[in-house]
Amino acid sequence: MKRLRYTLWIIVGFAAALFGLFAYQLSQPKDEFVESAMVGQPMPEFDLPPAVAERPGLSRVDLADGQPKLLNVFASWCVPCAAEAPQLDALERSGANIVGVAIRDRPEDLERFLAIYGNPFSRIGRDDISEVQLAIGSSGVPETFVIDGSGTITYQHIGDIREGDVPTLLDELQKAGS
Amino acid sequence: MIAELGLAALWLAAALAVLQLIGALFGARHDGNELAALVRPAAVLQGLLCAVSFLALVYAFAVTDLSVKLVAANSHSVKPLAFKLSGAWANHEGSMLLWITVMAFAGGLIAFIERRLPERTMMATLGTQAFVGIGFYLFILLSSNPFERLSPVPPEGNGLNPLLQDMGVSFHPPTLYIGYVGLSVAFSFALGALLTRQVTPEFARVMRPWVLGSWIFLTIGITAGSYWAYYELGWGGWWFWDPVENASLMPWLAATALLHSASVLAARDALRTWTIMLGVVAFSMSMVGTFLVRSGILTSVHAFAVDPERGSFILMLLALYIGGALVIFALRANTIAEGERFSVLSREGALVVNNVALTAILGIVLLGTLYPLLTEAFDVRVSVGPPYFDPVSAIFFLPMLAIMAVGPLLRWRKDSFDRIKVPVLIIALVTVAVFALVLVLADVSFLSLMGMAMSIGVAIASFMPLRGRSIRRVPLAVWGMCIAHFGVALALFGVAADTAFQKERLVAASPGDTVEVGPWEAKLASISPVAGPNWTAMQGDIFVSYMGGPPTETFPQARSFWAPQGETSEVALVTRWNGQLYVALGNRAEDGRWQLRLWWKPFVTWIWYGGLLIALGGAMALIGRVIGDVRRRHATARGEERRAEEAGLLPEPAE
Amino acid sequence: MRFLLPILAAFFLVQPASAQDRMPPAPYAYTQLEDPALEDQARELMHTLRCLKCQSQSIADSDAPMAGDMRHQVRTRIAAGESPAEVREWLISRYGDYVSYEPQVSSTTWPLFAIPVVLILLAAGVLLRRVGRRDEPEAGEGEGA
């Protein structure tokens, strides 16, 4: 009988733990971001053709030229990508070298997008089958990666860049450069 | 006006629930308290008021009264009427109103008809029912008022998610809800019996129809939901071990266990504490499921504005009711005398194995569903899916099937193996033969192989209990058991066969092309646009023939809805006795050809036939039990009359 | 039975129509491999990989463009001779354990495998206790089950 009672109190304890977990998770902001496991890893081998005529394409070699860069994964059909355009401009004006990977995008759509929202990119690679996106563990658009001079990913920003994120990114870029 | 009427009825019902609780508190302590006389009428009236309230909401949806916020947010004037009506419960507020309505209605029903238990136990039961109800009334009235008005009135509503504009999905949430909430009655009975220390076979007999009823609805709900996902999502899957699916499976597993343990308690006065425990667990699983779905803490969905206030409210109710019930249980369980004893080789013994296995499966589903939530607390994200659930639950499911085949052949209390030797050998031989046959003829996975062999073994075993009995004298409840067990075998065979033998074909086709998939040949004749009330679609015209037989014309569609916007795939299904051809029309490729997805799914329909048979078996058992109860009641009443008459003959008539 | 998910969607108003690209799907997103044996391997694997953009769906059950691109990756890699385990490993090295529905035993997932073992032991214990009691008339009733 005693054993039964212990078993029952264990069940009560289990339920309490469960409710505690639920309560904790309810109080946590729910972020749905899937973080890349590639942060800290060298960029994988890739070579993308240019997405628009006025900018060259992008390959692994371009990212290992000794200068740290921001790699922005974006698309013209993505609404938050338009929203982050002013912040990308601000970053470029602050001296950041930004390269772009255009996901599943048609050149004419992209031209229009860049004409409206500005073109802060030094290179834009055309990724029609999300191959680079998958290779660097990005799970959506927009995402921004910091790549150091040797071509290693040092930081990942998921979602559109808000004004408050600009200093963080500049900071990360600086760290990657030193 | 109607909306205000609905709200007023709901407030009144809530007040009656408070009255019912107070009356029951007094009634459960002393027999014949005056306030206790109020309890039953309060429960009945409360049920009726909730029904009025719910009908008021349905009316607001039927006439698309856009001044009601809920209607404006979820309905649209050009929607077909059936989907306007189903819109009433296809949203948070409406579904909570449905929840409380079912609960109040069930409470009213037991108050009205149930007179077999000691009055104090009934008072404790109805008090519990009212206590649980009050929490949900508060929840609806304070944080989820479905009748809230909107000003100014918008010119048009937002509409309903296109995926939900389907007959199957319209009527399956209420089904599932009736099942979920029906288990609250089992919960209340269990607590009533526990509080008044009346855990008797009579209690099990009184509770059993309610468990059976809920279980039937849960079974139908899960089966219908599975079929809906199968034909609506357009990829031919019928079970994904998704958290939300698991939320509906867990109460079903607990209810299944409860059903079987209640039988033991009713027939043999054993497994007393265990049955009470399951009564608490079953409804707990309903509430946990509702919480998981409503709070949104589990589903990884980007676009949802999850309301933490609502989640916290449900969590508080969970902690109060489940936590409270478990504490009472832990305090009281020792005071319930142990039940009758039995030998291992007996019907009870088999049912204990069944209960242990079902509970273990429940534990695994709970673990696998909540584990990602646990790791997320430590910032680690993992996914648990079919590759985990399938084999791990099979560890318990396969032995359970074996017991399910043999158990019904055993006698209560004590039996000998010699007596059941012949049927058991037959079942075992057939199972092994099928196993060997499939192993030699086909290259299939171990689980599918086991599934096929055991399903055939169980199918034969399910009718073994009828052996040697006069078919016409077999009670309805036994028929019910046989049919439900046969249904399990049928569903399992469908699962195993579809998994092992399905054929998939993905092609880009132009009109005139012919595609082969398994024994089928499909010829794409043309593709043309069609229009519905609130959608337009591209429709394929495809002739399919089975093994060179006469062609059947089918019309898969890719639909685009405009209020709100969304795309659905209306698949074409060609059903044969041995399976289904599944044709889905995809997008147009750049070169002008059309994406076609075809599957030949052998015996897949048996999954849902099996599910329906399980429910049918449950219904037969329920009818059999209720008829038995009514007969017994009549017999007792007649006996009492006769005794009264006899007694009346002897002494002087009273003045 | 993903049936409650859309209902859940409806609870919180309707999702905004998400922006869609207008590119054709990747070559192997909707096209099977020539070799049926390889296609079988790829299909089985795809059913156990999580679509990162969807509401808990596998990439084999989703129309999302990214799921299509992931199917393309899986099929081309399988066709190039990689084993399903290698492809899974490749994706896990990009996205962590989240991308795979098949949890691997690791420092974070061991309870998923330990607890069923405990359950088996518990179940066996409960049942064995009953068997052991067959000859003891004093033995109790099956409360602990």
Image: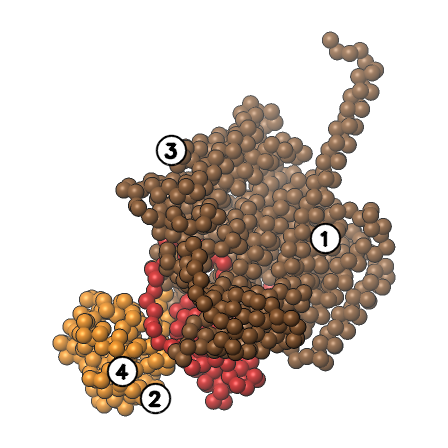
Q: Which residue is mark 3?
A: B1
Same chain letter for marks 2 and 3: no
Q: Position of residue B343 (x, y in %)?
A: 77, 55
Q: Which residue is mark 1?
A: B481
For the N terminus of chain B, the quadrant is top left
Q: Given the image, what chain letter belongs to the residue carrying mark 4?
A: A
For image coordinates 48% across by 52% down, the residue present is B290
Q: Which residue is mark 4?
A: A51
Mark 3 Cα-neighbour bin, 10 Å: few <14, some 14–19, many ≥20: few
> Earlier along the polypeptide chain: callout 2 or callout 4?
2
Q: Amino acid at mark 4?
A: Ala
Q: Amino acid at mark 2?
A: Glu
For image coordinates 42% across by 43% down, the residue present is B61
Look at the numbered discs 2 and 1 and tell me whether their residues touch, using CB distance below 8 Å: no
Compute the Cα span from label 2 to label 1.
62 Å
Look at the numbered discs 3 and 4 and tell me whether their residues touch, using CB distance below 8 Å: no
Q: Nearer the viewer, mark 1 or mark 3?
A: 3
The chain assigned the colour orange in the figure is A
Tell me: residue B617, above or below residue B18: below
Q: Which residue is mark 2?
A: A45
Q: Amino acid at mark 3?
A: Met
Compute the Cα span from label 3 to label 4.
61 Å
Q: Given the image, what chain letter belongs to the residue carrying mark 3?
A: B
Q: Nearer the viewer, mark 1 or mark 4?
A: 4
Compute the Cα span from label 2 to label 4.
18 Å
Q: Amino acid at mark 1?
A: Met
